[in-house]
Image (cartoon, grey):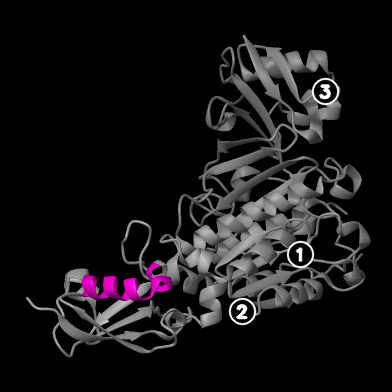
Amino acid sequence: MVKMPVNVYIGTPLRRFTGNQARVQVEARDVAEALDRLAARFPGLKAELFDEAGRLRRYVNVYVNSQEIEDLAGPNTPVRDGDEIAVVPALAGGAAPRTLTPEQVIRYSRHMIMPEIGGAGQRKLLGSSVLVIGAGGLGSPAILYLAAAGVGRIGVVDFDVVDLSNLQRQIIHHTDDIGRPKVESARDTVRRLNPDVEVVPYNTPLTSANALDIIKDYDVVVNGSDNFPTRYLVNDACVLLKKPLVDASVFKFDAQVTVFMPGRGCYRCLYPAPPPPGAVPNCAEAGVFGVVTGLVGCIQATEAIKLILGLGEPLVGRLLLIDTLAMDFRTVKIRRNPNCPVCGDNPTITELIDYEAFCGVPVLAQS
Amino acid sequence: MAVEVRVPAILQSAVGGQKVLKVEGRTVGEILDRLEQQFPGIKKLLLDENGEIRRHINIYLNDEDVRFLQRLDTPARDGDVLSILPALAGGQDHALR
């Protein structure tokens, strides 16, 4: 079979590797050969098209005369004189953007170069939404990494203002933010980091009256709350709305992290009731090793991103225990309790309750 | 039958500031009794008036919650690790108020 001259259409984000040429002619018998020729002529393009093993990357779609090669004979699809091959970054439906801008291709290139994420995964992230409860020790790094990763919409719930004593660990806020609402400070920091991300600020305490309404619009919830009423409220709301919840808490040098997936157990299965008021000192009383909140917030962001991408094994059914002084990480098993009042077989809690009363604490006072 | 008992930061003040203790006992209940002999008062932080594990406390033998084993009757073997895991709220500044 003789080699035929075929036209190759180069998708916009890839043209920076072809000297801005939209159409290139190569001689080839099949798609694989055409792409090899292309890669040989434009070395920068090679890494965009192929992984280390020489396989075509998942985020690159190749068409012959407008038909995806996956529906033809893959890379072995033969080409004839006058055929057109199109090489374009993958497209996807849903809320995910159908294409990435050239800037986005560069911004997220270290993600997209990994076949586990690729262009499709990155577009999924851009089309996803995460609600972060609290822009504090855990929320700060979680929001920053979610934003850097390109999670398209990040809701932030916090009614507090930035205090000087927060800055030892709440790295989304800066010294000149002192006195400002945390949600505003967080939004401004994210804007500077990544304009692709929309931050939705909720400058209000999360309550039984607003929780369902706020949480329902998000794919994943990251819990960085600092008190038991909110912790149980977020849990129950996520169970009722069937939302995955990435939960964590920190005490001094230690932390606990886990992921609750709908139908696979919840915070009440793990801790059916909060400690009596006053039994557990808070961070202000006991102190908190600032960097631990960074570590744990990053683990929460990792789990949230994994859930969005369907990547790896989520931290479900396992409680990760972290002791940073020993730098010891271990996991213990956690299980769904069939008698759980909210996620059990015969739930008795079918709507949100009064969590202040449940936890025996007075109504949150605005600080 | 020495078991390694791991005490969370939040309860360490009740056991003389120690993080890891070696305690003898054939069951989880016996281990808690021995712990109480050494550090009077620790048991009531873990168990309620009826002798049940408090609902905000989890006791693990190795990686299993003893509630899913035989609770306080769960047998312990030499070298086992008993971990006490209380519910924590923290993350930010103002926990219970």
Residue A33, magenta (yes or no): yes
The magenta span reads A31-46
Badge 2 and badge 3 both on one subunit: no
SS for callout 1: loop
Q: Nearer the viewer, residue A339 or A314?
A: A314
Badge 1 and badge 2 both on one subunit: yes
Point out residue A287 in the picture as x, y percentages from the top left corner. 87, 45
Residue occupied by mark 3 = B15
- Where B33 falls versus A206 (above or below)? above
Residue occupied by mark 2 = A196
Give the residue displayed 41% in from the left and 67% down from the top: A47
- Where A208 falls versus A15 (above or below)? above
Residue occupied by mark 1 = A135
Point out residue B12 in the picture as x, y percentages from the top left corner. 81, 29
Q: Where is the N terminus of chain A found, in terms of image quarters? A: bottom left
Residue A348 visible in this rendered orientation of the protein: no
Considering the whole magenta stretch, tell me its main secondary structure: helix
Residue A89 visible in this rendered orientation of the protein: yes
User: Tag 1, which chain?
Assistant: A
Give the residue displayed 88% in from the left and 71% down from the top: A177
User: Tag 2, which chain?
Assistant: A
Give the residue displayed 79% in from the left and 58% down from the top: A356
Left or right: where does residue A32 sit relative to residue B4?
left
Query: Which class describes the residues within 10 Å of circle 3: few (<14), some (14-19), or many (20+)?
Result: some
The amino acid at mark 1 is: Ala
Query: Which class describes the residues within 10 Å of circle 1: few (<14), some (14-19), or many (20+)?
Result: many
The amino acid at mark 2 is: Asp
**Disc on res. B3:** none
SS for callout 2: loop
- Where A133 falls versus B44 (above or below)? below
